[in-house]
Every structure is written in C-alpha cells, then in structure tokens.
Amino acid sequence: MQGVASAGATAKETNYASVAWSQFVPLVVVFVLAIVVPFVSNDYWVLIATRAAVYWVLVAGLNLMIGFAGQLAIGYVALLTLGAYITSVLAAGNVMPPVNPFIALGVAGLGGSVFGVIVGLPALRLRTFYFAISTLGFATIVTQTALAWQSVTGGGIGLPGPEFPAPLNTHWGFYYFCLAIAAFCTWMTYNVAQSRFGRALIAVRDADVAADATGISKPRLLIVVFLFCGALAAVAGGLFASLQTYITPEAFTFDLSVLFFIAVLIGGRGSILGPLLGTVILTLLPEFAAPLAAWSTFLYAVLLLVIVLAAPGGIAAAGDRSRVRSPGRPCPGRRSRNLRRPSHGCTLTRAVDYDSARRSYADQRRADHDHRHRAADLRRAVSGNRAPERLNSFVLLRLDQPDCRSRFH
Amino acid sequence: MLASILASGLAMGAVYALIGITYNTMFSASRVVSFTAGQLGMLGGVFGSLFVLRLGMPMIIGLLFTFACCAIIGVITEIVAVRPVLKSLDQHLYVLSTLALALMIQQVTAIEWSTEPQPFPRIFGIGSGGITDERFWLPIVACAATIIGLELLYRRTLIGHAFLAIAEDNFAARALGLPERNLRIASYALAGMIGALAGFSGGALLLAFVANGFLLNFYGFIPVALGGLGNNRGAIVGGFALGIFQQTANFLVGGIFSSVVVFVIFIILLLAAPQGLFGASATRRV
C-alpha cells in the first residue's frame, strides 16, 4: 500500500520536474544567445542588447504583476523614471555629497519598492480600473515633478546619468553587467513562478474570492509583489540612466510604459519566456522599421487592441491551449451572462463576482437544465428575487476551478 | 488672492466634473469605465482650435462640428473597444481595449496636430484678464448647462427614461423590449459631446494640447472615484471640490507639490472610502 503511494508520488514529482525543465531550458538558451551577442556583432547591437536587458529587468517584475497577479499597471514608466532620477541625483550629488553609483542603485531600488507599494495600495481594495488609473496618475505626477523641481532634477534640461567604475564603463562591460542583473531577475521570477507563491498569485488573478477562502491573503501577497516589482523597476531605471548617459523628463514618455505593458501581454499570462521574447522583439522592432518610428506607439496601440480582441492569452497561450480559459464558451447561460442586474450605484466588484458566479452556475447546469435555467433567469429578473443566485454562487464557487469541475462531471 | 483661487478652482473643477460626467455616461450605459473620456476632453480643445482658428469657421459652427466629431469618436469607442469585450466583462479586457483606443487617438493627434500646446480662440471676448475673464466662468456655465440638460433629458423625455432603465436594470429593460444596443450607442455619442464641451469650454484654460488627454483622464476620474461610479451628483461635487483643493494646494505649497498632494489625498480617500463618498456602500463579495 505504502509502496503504491510512494510510486505515485515519484511519478508525480518527475512530472513536475519535467514541466519545470521544459520551461527552464528555453530561458537558458536565450541567456546563452545573449552572451554571444557581442562576439558576433558590433558596438551598436551591443547597445541595443543592453537596452533589451535593462527593459527586461523591469518587465520581469511587471510580468509577475500583470501576467501572474493580473493587476493592470499601465503607468509603470513612472517607477523607471523615479529609479533613474534617484540614482542620477545621488550619483551626481545634487542634494548631498556624491555617493557610489552602486549604493545609489541600491537606494533607488529601495525607493522604488516604497513607491511601488504606495501606488499599488488602491489595488488591495478596489479592482482593475482604479489601480490602472492610480498608476497612470502617478506617471503624470512623476513627470511633472521632474520637470518642476529644477534644483534637484535639473528640470527640462536634465542631468547626467551615473557612471559606473572601470570595467563597467565600456559597452561590453556594461552589457555583461546588465545581462547579469537581468539573468538574476529571470532566475528570481522563475523561482517565484514555480513556487506556491506564484500559484497563489494566479489564484488571486483568476478567482480571488476562492483564493481568499483557501487561506491566501491577497493584500499580503500583493504588497510583496509591489515591493519586488517596484525595486526591479527602479533598478532598471538606474541602469537606463547610465545607459542613456544623460536623462531628461522627455526620455520617459508614456510610450515606454506601453512598450512594457505590451511586451507582457504579447508574451501571455503566466509565462516567463513569452514576455522575455516580447521584450526582445519590441526593442528590436524600431531598428528594423525606422520609417515607422514616429508611428511606433500607434502601432503598439493597434497591437494591444488586436491582442485583446483576438487572442487575450498572448503567444504563450497559442502554444499551450490547455491553459487558456476560453473567454466565451457557448453554453445556455451565455446569453444571460451580460444581463446582470446592476442595481443603482452598484459597484464593479459586485457586478463582476455576480457575473462569474453566474457563469459557473450556467456551466454546471448546461447539459440538462437549459430551459429551466432560462425560465428561472427570466422569472427572477422579472420578480426581482435574487435568492437563488446568492445560494448558488456560494456553493458553486468551488466549482469555478476547472479541476474541481471535472471531478463533478 | 482668495477670489482668484476660487475662480480658477471652480473653473478647473467644472472641467473635471464634466469629464467625470463623461465617464459616468459611458459607465451607466455599459458598465465599462473608458480611458477615452479624457481624450474626448482633449479633442474638444483640439477640434475647437482646429475649426475656429485654423479653418476660420464661426464660433457656433465650430462648436457644432466639434460636437459632431467627438460624438463620432464616442460611437467608435463603443463599436471598437466596448462592444467586443462586453461578453467577458468579468475579465476586465475593457481596461486594455479602451486604453489602446485612447493611445491611438492620442498618437494620431500628436502626429497630425502638434505635440506643443496650441492657442485656443476667445469665444465671447468678455472680460480681459482678472477674475471675470470668460475662461473662468465659461466652464462653469457649460457645466451648469450640462447638468440642466441632462436632468431634463433623464426626467422629461422618453429616451432619457430608456437611458435610466438601461442603467438601472439592463436585463429587465431588455425584457421590456428596449433596444439596448442602440441606446448604448446613443449614450456613447452623448458622452462624446459632454467630453467635447468640457474641452471646448475649458479651452482657454487648458489650451489645445495633446498631453491634456491623460491628465484629464486622471483628474477627471478622481471626482468619479470620490462620488461613486455612475453617480453624476457625486461627480459634480467631487469635481468642484477637487478643482478648489488643487488650486489652494497650488497656492499654498507651490506648483511642484500640489499634484503630489492631490495624488496622496486621492490614494488615502480610495483606501478610506473605496466606493466613493457618495457611492452605495453595499459590496457583496459572494
């Protein structure tokens, strides 16, 4: 009996190991390719590759936030700006004696994590749009402050970025420095994604009430993610400032935010390789389509719209159909899905939870309760009596998880 | 000093309140909060300047054309960014689709119009400088006119009642045979015109500037967040409160930190009263 159990456990472990392995190998391949870039090309491409590595440091964190936790942070360029200015100001010694650029980078990381949490606070209590708008507001405010606070940030004239000591001030040296940090970030986010922490994030993204019920503390989880992402974004900012050698508020347009955002979305939710490829592709794209440079943000926006409307899962989902939650499975309840009954002044939260509960209900009953369900829907809507849903949403929440559902069929 | 703070505060507040009403009009028709609200405000200024200053149209014709263009943008929003994602409202795809459309609008404006602030025509030429200047009272008049117009529309007309019915209970309204889709399109056209009015009346204050789009998105959403989504009265009160608060902070702590103060207050208020100060507090999680 015991033997059978342990054999089963071993089989399960190898299964997990092979899954982890198959996700890890492509990342190593990308890393090896990145190492050989300087040997097969010139300084210009090294510079582009450095930029991709710096962007990836930020996107790696953003990926946990958007792809795993499902929090739509749209103004993330603000934290890049913040990190760039903290590092540059400290290294240039505008407010106090100049400090070592490495220490400045560390301080920027700390500052970024603090502001990452402050900006993320609305996400703990409110959903999606509020968080999106608060990050957007933060982005506008950071730019305004950078422009107006001339004594420290140099205003519109800007200030020089930090310069790192000897081996790192060449193109090659700085590239390998950024690549090392990028690889370290990849390794960290990979570990997070593979652990129960990452699974908890996905649970919060897909069914936060169910996650709550299984003992996952959403606020604690999200605050850790905000700390981590903020730190990565600010460190990326410090590296960016050093790469640019001179920074002005114009260097940090909202367009950059869109680039980061789309890199994650193209890559797909819950993947690390996808956003990594997305970042590399989007960094390279303007190099190949120079005539379109002025329209690049417009094209990114079109791309975003197309992704949202045609393939909400991104590249990663195209390769792995089983993980995609189909956005609109035909079922008898579907017609009634967006016919929620929003009472006056109803909140987003409520409408949404009600909706997902309704869908799980409809999914459950789709085989044999078609007519009865519709009739009941109509009756309830007409009479205004909502007791049945309340009961069903409560009971069926567990069934919202695909695994649980198959067990009941 | 106090008078000028009040004048500019009320004027900015009126613009914010109008953008808030734009958000609400779209929200009550579709349960979608759209990023295009701020862009419509920006376009109101840009189209106004384009038609009146560049093409030399008379003021009233320019205003009508601005209304028409923004109404069309509103309808495009509904068709391109809202209708396709209504099926899966719970996935919040509308945040991305409306953001994408807002970015497209902004980029086209930046490339085809200008990335620098452009002058906006004087509308009546009443009161030069001082606190009786038209740029201070015009947004307030526009806001009052919109409030009265909306009240009349919602209370006195059949189509207004239909709007309310859709907002109140979508399902029952459809069961009664109301053409929900057409009413939604009409609401988006209406929202476009309100946004256009915000930009047009505030044109002298904000200028025809492409960067106003996301600025108005943020400052216009604060009244909505304060007043509760879908609550027009809350948005108006919140808008004026924000305008006066912002101008006072501007005077007290200076331009650098006034936006920081506004942002901090916004975050604190959201944490303290997530559903807004006037919104319905009943949130049922399950």
Image (spheres, coloured by chain):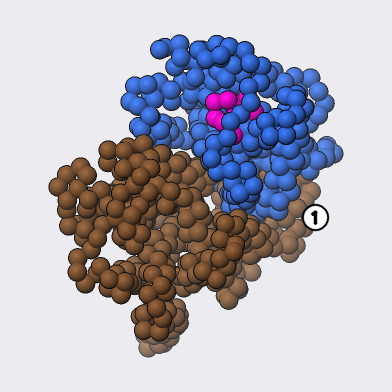
Give the image location of residue B90, x and y in percent.
Answer: 60, 51
Residue at 31% in and 71% down: A171
Whether residue A148 sits left or right of residue B230 in the image: it is: left
Residue A369 lies, with reference to residue A86, above or below; the image says: below
Residue at 79% in and 43% down: B181
If the image is split into quadrants, where does the N terminus of chain B sit? top left
Quarter residue A324 falls in: bottom right
Q: Chain of mark 1?
A: A
Q: State which chain is coloured brown.
A: A
Chain part drawn in magenta: B200-208
Give the image location of residue A48, x and y in percent.
Answer: 42, 69
Residue at 27% in and 41% down: A152
The residue carrying pointer 1 sits among few (fewer than 14), some (14 to 19) or many (20 or more) residues within 10 Å by Cα, namely few
Which residue is disc 1 drawn over?
Answer: A371
Q: Main secondary structure of the magenta part?
A: helix
Residue B193 seen in the figure: no
The residue most toward the left is A97
For the residue marked with disc 1, what is the amino acid? His
Disc 1 element = helix
Quarter residue B258 falls in: top left
Give the image location of residue B118, x and y in percent.
Answer: 58, 35
Residue A282 lies, with reference to residue A93, above or below; the image says: below
| In front of the other: A83 or B264 | A83
Which color is chain B depicted in? blue
Give the image location of residue B251, x and y in percent.
Answer: 37, 21
